[in-house]
Image (cartoon, rainbow, N blue to C red):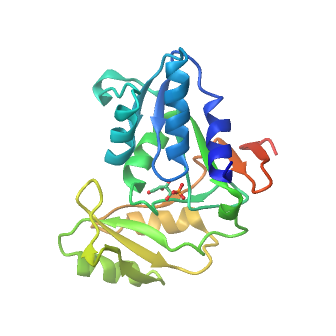
């Protein structure tokens, strides 16, 4: 079994009947959504909200009940992937462009479980260029201000076209090199008018599930290890 699938399936064991679940986005969460659907067919009763159009469609195809945000209070548990995770459980997310919806859902969840394969663990964040979501209006000016913070920014494209997030915004992939102070960087980025949010998730994860190539899996809880 792939390390991503191992981590995803372990995290799904934490789901209990009656919970409202946040579904993340990406190739690791793909396995979690499939496992949740399997458990629903075996009798698990949950309802879910999704962090992207893609995850919502997949969940609906597999029979996972997606409910409107107006019908839920707090989300009990969100399961999501990450592009990098450091020793403090700080994350870079947004490789799939879903960072804004993911951050909103994570911030409204009692538990936020991050599922990764071992390749995502790093000493310091920053090997993966930091995704920053920017409104298209006057994006050149916004990107100039982002560059002034000390990075090389690149407008994300897909198949030769400018990539647009589910929110209709641009994603700017920013190479800052090693990110030593993620809390400060996230505050500086988000203070630039035109920046909607960025992919740094600082002190948000409550649990990390890591899948390894040798078939093992490790769970770590924030502040416990
Ligand atoms: O925007 C996408 C998300 O932040 C993903 O959770 C992240 O990119 C990890 O994706 P994957 O599990 O495909 O590596």
The quadrant in which residue 219 appears is top right
Front in this rendered view, residue 175 or 27? 27
Q: Let me know if residue 201 appears in the view.
A: yes
Q: Quadrant of residue 146?
A: bottom left
Q: Is residue 199 above or below residue 75?
A: below
Please name whichever residue, 69 or 53, is drawn nearer the observer in this view of the structure: 53
| 196 or 64: nearer the viewer | 64
The x, y position of residue 168, in whole percent, is: 22, 59
Residue 55 drawn at (x, y percent): 39, 43
Q: Is residue 180 left or right of residue 67?
A: right
Which residue occupies 35% across, 32% down?
A: 60
Q: Is residue 148 visible?
A: no
At 40% across and 67% down in the image, what residue appears?
132
Q: Residue at x 49, y 37 (%)?
A: 33
Residue 86 x, y percent position in the rendering: 68, 61
In the picture, measured across the screen, residue 32 lies left or right of residue 142, that is right
Quadrant for the C terminus in the image: top right
Q: Is residue 77 left or right of residue 131?
A: right
**Which residue occupies the extreme left position in the image?**
137
Q: Residue furthest front?
A: 1
Query: Where residue 51 sits: x, y (%)?
Result: 39, 44
Give the residue displayed 49% in from the left and 42% down from the top.
106
Total marks in image: 0
């Amino acid at each position: 079994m792939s390390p991503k699938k191992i981590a995803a399936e372990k995290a799904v064991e934490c789901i209990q009947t009656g919970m409202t679940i946040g579904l993340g986005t990406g190739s690791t969460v793909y396995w979690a959504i499939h496992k949740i659907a399997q458990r629903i067919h075996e009798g698990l009763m949950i309802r879910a909200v999704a962090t992207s159009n893609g995850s919502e469609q997949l969940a609906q195809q597999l029979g996972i009940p997606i409910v409107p945000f107006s019908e839920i209070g707090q989300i009990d548990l969100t399961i999501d992937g990450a592009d990098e995770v450091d020793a403090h459980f700080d994350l870079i997310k947004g490789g799939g462009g879903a960072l804004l919806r993911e951050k909103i859902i994570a911030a409204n969840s009692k538990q936020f479980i991050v599922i990764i394969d071992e390749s995502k663990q790093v000493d310091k964040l920053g090997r993966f260029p930091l995704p920053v979501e920017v409104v298209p209006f006057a994006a050149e000016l916004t990107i100039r201000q982002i560059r002034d913070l000390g990075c090389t920014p690149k407008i994300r494209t897909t198949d030769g076209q400018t990539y647009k997030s589910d929110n209709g915004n641009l994603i700017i992939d920013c190479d800052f090199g090693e990110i030593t102070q993620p809390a400060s960087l996230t505050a500086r980025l988000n203070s630039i008018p035109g920046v909607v949010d960025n992919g740094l998730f600082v002190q948000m994860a409550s649990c990390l599930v890591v899948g390894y190539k040798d078939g093992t899996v490790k769970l770590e809880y924030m502040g416990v290890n």
